[in-house]
Image: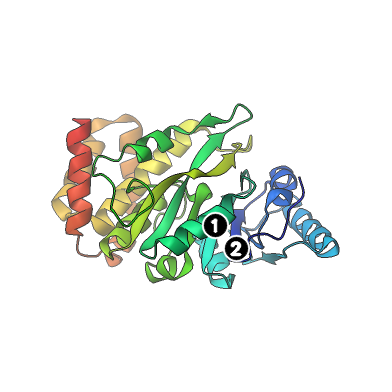
Amino acid sequence: MSASPTTPDVTVVVATRDRADDLRTTLPRHEAPVVVVDNGSTDGSVEVVRAESQRREGAGLPPLRLLQPGRNLGATARNLGVRAARTELVAFADDDSWWAPGALARAAEVFAAHPRMALLAARTLVGPAEDLDPICTDMASAPWGRSPDLPGPDVMGFLACTAVVRREAFLSAGGFDDVVFFAGEEERLTYDLVAAGWGLAYVDEVVAHHHPSTSRSPAHVRRELLGRNELLTAWMRRPLPVAAATTARWLAGGGEHRRSALDALPRLPRALRERRRPSPEVERRLRVLAERGA
């Protein structure tokens, strides 16, 4: 599929590490200008990116820029890409995801019509069968409803690889942080955007594709990492009694929860240095979620 220069108001930011094969498939699918941030790849990913950059230049397509911080920055690599972008909007993609044709042009129209919106969470189709990602069902049924000035249900979470952000809002909220580093990095950013009064909405008509890479950590490793980062985010943004009670419960519970809690402990001092007063609106929504799940 060839890209076409139809989305000048959006930049796609891709963070990658050691996934050259995936990049060969996904990079040519991006219709907008692209910034790729390489997290210290050693498998030829950089050469793939450079080749795609030259191809796009020769074909007169929107440019591709490569950033090489020289080490693995985890999710915060995306922050470098956002700072390098010169457009009002930034669409995130991973090396195994891409945006449907016309999706980013439509996203730009939606943002223009909704000035309070900081983040658009897209409908995400997974794998060759294009199954709807279950998180989309959760986002579409947000129990706290829909703000009248947003184009879809309010959300309290999103998939980083299929979201579009308003650059100003993303940077003002600090982007992704290196306390959690990677996995579940969306949570703290969501809390901070909501606390600042920005809107986050699920927009079903904007579509992204995600074909999970075969080069992934085992499922149990990712679950433990997500658990660790959930605890760290709680210490950074939730009421202290909530964070302490959750940590104690996980330590006593054994299994993956206990391993997640033990893994979080060395990072706890850093999390506490980044701590902010809990947001009443965030806590209200989280209580609604908890009651719904009870």
* Residue 180 visible to an observer of this rendering: yes
Q: Residue furthest left?
A: 241
Q: Are marks 1 and 2 in contact (CB under 8 Å)?
A: yes
Image check: 282 left or right of 127?
left
| Residue 145 image offset from top left, x and y in percent | 26, 44
Mark closest to the chain's N terminus, 1 or 2:
2
Please determine whether, in this image, residue 84 is positioned above or below residue 1.
below
Front one among 197 and 80: 197
Q: Which residue is mark 1?
A: 91
Q: How many C-alpha atoms fall within 10 Å of the one at disc 2: few (<14), some, or many (≥20)?
A: many
Q: Whole-percent x and y of residue 75?
A: 50, 56
Q: Which residue is mark 2?
A: 11
Rounded to the nearest angstrom, the CA distance separating label 1 from label 2 is 6 Å
**In the image, what residue type sits under mark 2?**
Thr
* 138, above or below 15, in the image: above
Q: Which residue is situated farthest in the right direction here?
A: 58
Q: Quadrant of the N terminus?
A: top right
- Left/right of residue 270 with respect to residue 124 in the rendered view: left
